[in-house]
Image (cartoon, coloured by chain):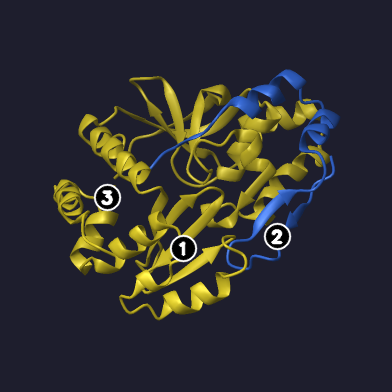
Amino acid sequence: MRIDYNIDSENEEQKIYTFCGDLEKELLSIGVPIEHIEEMKKRTLKTFLF
Amino acid sequence: MNILCDRDLSSFEIKSVPVEKIVGVRRAFPNKSVFDNIKQFNEINGFDVRKMIDCLEYANKMQYKELLNSYSILPDPVDLVHIIDTDEYYLSDEHNHTTMCAMIFNAPFIKAKVYECHFNQKRIEKYHRTMNFYKEYDIAWIEKDANCNIKIVFNRNDNLYCFNYGYINIAKCFNDIVAEIEEKLISYNGAAYTYNKLPFSFLKKFYYWYSMTSKQKEYVTMPLYSENNYFNEFLIYLNKDRNRRI
């Protein structure tokens, strides 16, 4: 799995980190099932607030 | 003390929890998917790129099955709150990166300190009122840092506006006039109407914020944290004040 992130260097105040390459492809390469990846694309997260 | 439930910090049990039952973490952007939160993030939400890389790199250090099993024998268990009413788990403290990676890798279980608790209906109602307020004023979230600076982040399309008390950072908006606006808004003196290039909705937000007294600003930022009734009072204030000219 090739892992790195690009930085949106134009915005110093709020740097956006974007996965280099194709995250789905990299996950598949280590054995994550495609069905699970599809589920993770749909599954939204809630937040737990204190 | 948290918003959705009452947790007894002294009472927890260490056990393996099915990862599929974890529905929320603390650092992710809500309403974005697990996949999208890992694919692209902003450190403003608490994610750290170095930690994220470290966690993902375990995939290169061990076989896939070994990787999945490693989450059930973590040396430092993650902190999870188990909402008994819904049988859902929320990450309540640290280990956001570890938990997100367990989710994306499809780990079956994760070792956790589990705090059992029930929803607090009163706080849930307050939470929903707050969320409605956020929606009405197009606010993404409000947070306080360690120095008690208040940061209000507004949604506007894909742009974020971050208010830090007396100044404003404008990100990714109105490319041709960003510098000018930023400079002038920092020295804002009540003449916001002169910036007629800004959309009305934005000016309205800005106007409200600067027309508030310190106490009223507290009303905006307190509802998530307070047991008092300031929030309703603040809504009444805003409703009365809505027709004022800007």
In front: B166, or B125? B166
Q: Is residue B133 above or below residue B103?
A: below
Chain identifier, blue in the render: A
The quadrant the C terminus of chain B occupies is bottom left
- First in sequence: mark 1 vs mark 3: 1
> Both on one chain, marks 1 and 2?
no
* Mark 3: few/some/many CA within 10 Å (<14, 14-19, 20+): some
Kind of residue at badge 3:
Tyr
Chain identifier, yellow in the render: B
Residue shown at 18%/49% (left/top)? B239
State the residue position of label 2: A8
Kind of residue at badge 2:
Asp
Q: Disc 3 on helix, strand or loop?
A: loop
State the residue position of label 1: B198
* Mark 2: few/some/many CA within 10 Å (<14, 14-19, 20+): few
Report the side of A47 relative to A31 (left or right).
left
Residue B50 seen from this side = yes
Q: Chain of mark 1?
A: B
Q: Nearer the viewer, mark 1 or mark 3?
A: 1
Q: Mark 3 and mark 2 in contact (Cβ < 8 Å)?
A: no
Residue B7 seen from this side = no
Q: Nearer the viewer, mark 1 or mark 2?
A: 1
Report the side of A2 relative to B231 (left or right).
right
Residue B34 placement: quadrant:
top right
